[in-house]
Image (tube, grey):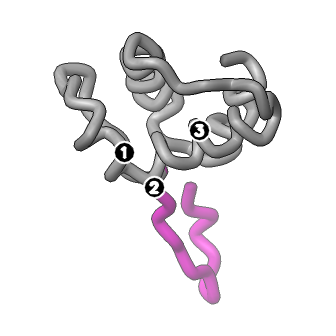
């Protein structure tokens, strides 16, 4: 959000790359930064966690809900 100051610099920030809700191939989903971050932090929070094929639908949904925002993904990881 601009403040309209003379010395203002504006940086546009975006979330990490994440799959669309229609993507379902687990192999291609691992190429997205948001999926890697979410799965990685889930495994850190729960070392016994094993990624199952049916988990990918929820992972894609979470990534879309938070629009790839890293902090939201890290926080969501503890809920998987």
Q: Position of residue 69 (x, y in %)?
A: 56, 44
Q: Nearer the viewer, mark 2 or mark 3?
A: 3
Disc 3 packing (10 Å; few <14; some 14–19; many ≥20): many
Q: How many marks?
A: 3
Q: Is 2 within the magenta?
A: yes
**Residue 21 vs residue 76: left or right?**
left
Q: Which residue is mark 1?
A: 30
Query: Which x, y percent locates residue 34?
Result: 48, 45
The mark lying in front, picked from 1 and 3, is: 1
Q: Is residue 78 above or below residue 43?
A: above
Q: Quadrant of the N terminus?
A: bottom right
- The CA distance from mark 2 to mark 3 is 17 Å
> Over which residues does the magenta segment extend?
1-15
- Answer with mark 2 or mark 3, whichever residue precedes in sequence: 2
From the top left corner, tell me how far across and down residue 40 is, in percent: 63, 45
Element type at marker 1? loop
Residue at the far bottom: name it: 7
Q: Main secondary structure of the magenta part?
A: loop
Tag 2–tag 1 contact (CB < 8 Å) = no
Q: Is residue 9 above or below residue 73?
A: below
Of callouts 1 and 3, the N-terminal one:
1
Q: Nearer the viewer, residue 80 or 4?
A: 80
- Quadrant holding the C terminus: top right
Q: Is residue 41 left or right of residue 70?
A: right
Pointer 3 residue: 38
Rendered image: mark on residue 14: 2
């Amino acid at each position: 959000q601009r403040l309209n100051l003379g010395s203002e610099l504006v940086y546009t920030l975006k979330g990490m790359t994440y799959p669309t809700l229609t993507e379902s191939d687990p192999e291609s989903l691992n190429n997205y930064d948001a999926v890697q971050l979410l799965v990685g932090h889930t495994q850190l929070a729960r070392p016994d966690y094993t990624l199952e094929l049916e988990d990918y639908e929820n992972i894609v949904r979470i990534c879309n809900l938070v629009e790839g925002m890293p902090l939201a993904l890290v926080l969501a990881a503890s809920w998987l």
